[in-house]
Image: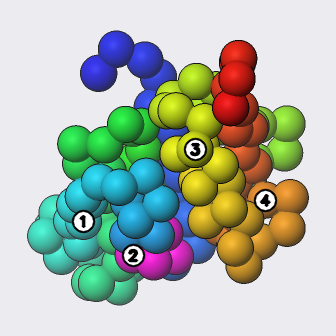
């Protein structure tokens, strides 16, 4: 890993978010439950750690337990500038906007763009 990787702490939605993001960017994902990690501070099937696998972008996510703070994106934008060709970036934008407004349905703000012709 050569760059910072976002790690989203989600309110019980990591199991839905990870495959959604994996589908958008065309990669796999892995999920380890609280039970897999020996955690007893939340539901056994909650996501203790998950991540995108072999994709063009890196992302980690987990469900929060108890009074852990939930991810909020106030003042944060995940930039995918130049991460793929223009047609792919347009498709990512369309897919991420589905079910969302300016942010996707998981509360993440995205900045997607490219330079040059497209």
Residue 18 in view, yes or no: no
Residue at image position (49%, 32%) is: 84
Label 4, label 2: how far apart the Cα atoms are = 19 Å
Label 1, label 4: how far apart the Cα atoms are = 24 Å
Q: Are marks 3 and 2 in contact (CB under 8 Å)?
A: no
Residue 40 in the image: state x and y as whole percent: 27, 75
Q: Nearer the viewer, residue 14 or 28?
A: 28
The residue at which mark 2 appears reads as 15
Q: Is residue 80 left or right of residue 36?
A: right
Q: Nearer the viewer, residue 47 or 107?
A: 107
Q: Which mark is residue 87?
A: 3
Q: Which mark is residue 103?
A: 4
Q: How many residues crowd around disc 4 within 10 Å: few (fewer than 14), some, or many (20 or more)? A: some
Camera-near label (3 vs 2) is 3
Q: Are marks 2 and 1 in contact (CB under 8 Å)?
A: yes
Q: How many residues crowd around disc 1 within 10 Å: few (fewer than 14), some, or many (20 or more)? A: many
Image quarter of residue 118 = top right
Q: Nearer the viewer, residue 117 or 63?
A: 117
Label 1 element class? strand
Residue 78 in the image: state x and y as whole percent: 66, 37
Nearer-N-terminus badge (1/4): 1
Which image quarter is the N terminus in? top left
Q: How many residues crowd around disc 2 within 10 Å: few (fewer than 14), some, or many (20 or more)? A: many
Label 4 element class? loop
Residue 25 in view, yes or no: yes
> What span is colored magenta in the figure?
13-17
Label 3, label 2: how far apart the Cα atoms are = 28 Å
Nearer-N-terminus badge (4/3): 3
Label 1, label 3: how far apart the Cα atoms are = 29 Å
The residue at which mark 1 appears reads as 31
Nearer-N-terminus badge (4/2): 2
């Amino acid at each position: 890993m050569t760059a910072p990787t976002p790690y989203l702490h989600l309110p019980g939605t990591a199991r839905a978010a990870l495959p959604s993001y994996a589908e958008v960017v065309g990669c796999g994902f892995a999920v380890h439950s609280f039970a897999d990690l020996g955690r007893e501070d939340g539901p056994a099937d909650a996501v203790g750690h998950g991540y995108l696998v072999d994709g063009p972008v890196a992302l980690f996510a987990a469900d929060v337990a108890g009074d852990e703070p939930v991810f909020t994106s106030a003042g944060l934008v995940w930039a995918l500038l130049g991460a793929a060709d223009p047609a792919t970036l347009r498709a990512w934008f369309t897919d991420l906007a589905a079910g969302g407004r300016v942010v996707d349905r998981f509360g993440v703000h995205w900045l997607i763009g490219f330079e040059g012709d497209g």
